[in-house]
Image: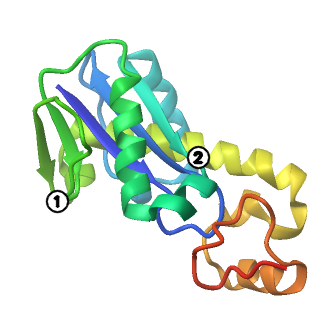
């Protein structure tokens, strides 16, 4: 059984990232990545990666602008599931929507808080995306991506107003103006 979840749906910049996880062993303290500190997420991410089959799916800001965020989230999940090295008999999905795949799937509202495989996917996807945004911060330091991770903080909106959008911003999102 695999679990899948995505992160970065509400961001103004960067990709949406999904992970799919098949746990090889029970891992304690798994929960929704948003309920964990950064330090705890990073520690659990290492444990999950060492004790699971996993796949990531990434959908760029350009793809998001072309197909919308819901479709991009589903595409990221589809890519993550297809990137698993082992085909799951069942995929548990956080939320109410299923990606277009010929695999048995079950949606679970709030699944990232109650289903360990979905929690694990949430954690490794969040750590992966956060690390990616830290890399982007080196290229675009004026947006402080290492701190805001692309989310629409007051500071981030001010940086967009001052500098205009950069090439990783989602141009179709409200508050992201092209200069």
Going 21% across and 49% down the picture, which residue do you hit? 98
How far across and how far down the image is residue 26, in percent? 24, 23
**Mark sitting on residue 109:** 1
Nearest to the observer: residue 13 or residue 22: 13
Nearest to the observer: residue 61 or residue 120: 61
The image quadrant of residue 110 is bottom left
The relative height of residue 26 versus residue 177 in the rendered view (above or below) is: above
Going 81% across and 68% down the picture, which residue do you hit? 143
Rounded to the nearest angstrom, the CA distance separating label 1 from label 2 is 22 Å
| Camera sees residue 147 | yes
The image quadrant of residue 137 is bottom right
The image quadrant of residue 47 is top left
Callout 1 crowding tier (Cα within 10 Å): few <14, some 14–19, many ≥20: few
Q: What residue is disc 2 on? A: 129
| Camera sees residue 40 | no
Q: Horizontally, is 129 left or right of 125 in the view?
A: right
- Name the image quarter holding the N terminus: top left
**Marks 1,2: beta carbons within 8 A:** no
- Name the image quarter holding the C terminus: bottom right
How far across and how far down the image is residue 167, in percent? 78, 60
Going 84% across and 78% down the picture, which residue do you hit? 164
């Amino acid at each position: 059984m695999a679990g899948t979840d995505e992160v970065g749906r509400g961001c103004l910049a960067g990709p949406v990232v999904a992970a799919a996880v098949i746990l090889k062993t029970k891992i304690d303290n798994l929960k929704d990545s948003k309920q964990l500190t950064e330090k705890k997420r990073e520690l659990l991410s290492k444990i999950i990666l060492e004790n699971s089959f996993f796949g990531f799916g990434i959908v760029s800001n350009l793809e998001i602008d072309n197909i919308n965020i819901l479709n991009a989230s589903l595409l990221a999940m589809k890519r993550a599931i297809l990137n698993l090295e082992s085909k799951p008999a069942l995929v548990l999905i956080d939320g109410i929507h299923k990606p277009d795949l010929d695999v048995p799937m079950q949606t679970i509202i709030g699944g990232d808080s109650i289903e360990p495989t979905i929690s694990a996917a949430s954690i490794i996807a969040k750590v992966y995306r956060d690390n990616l945004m830290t890399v982007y911060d080196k290229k675009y330091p004026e947006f402080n991506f290492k701190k805001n991770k692309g989310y629409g903080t007051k500071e981030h909106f001010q940086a967009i107003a001052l500098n205009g959008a950069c090439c990783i911003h989602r141009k179709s999102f409200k508050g992201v103006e092209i200069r």
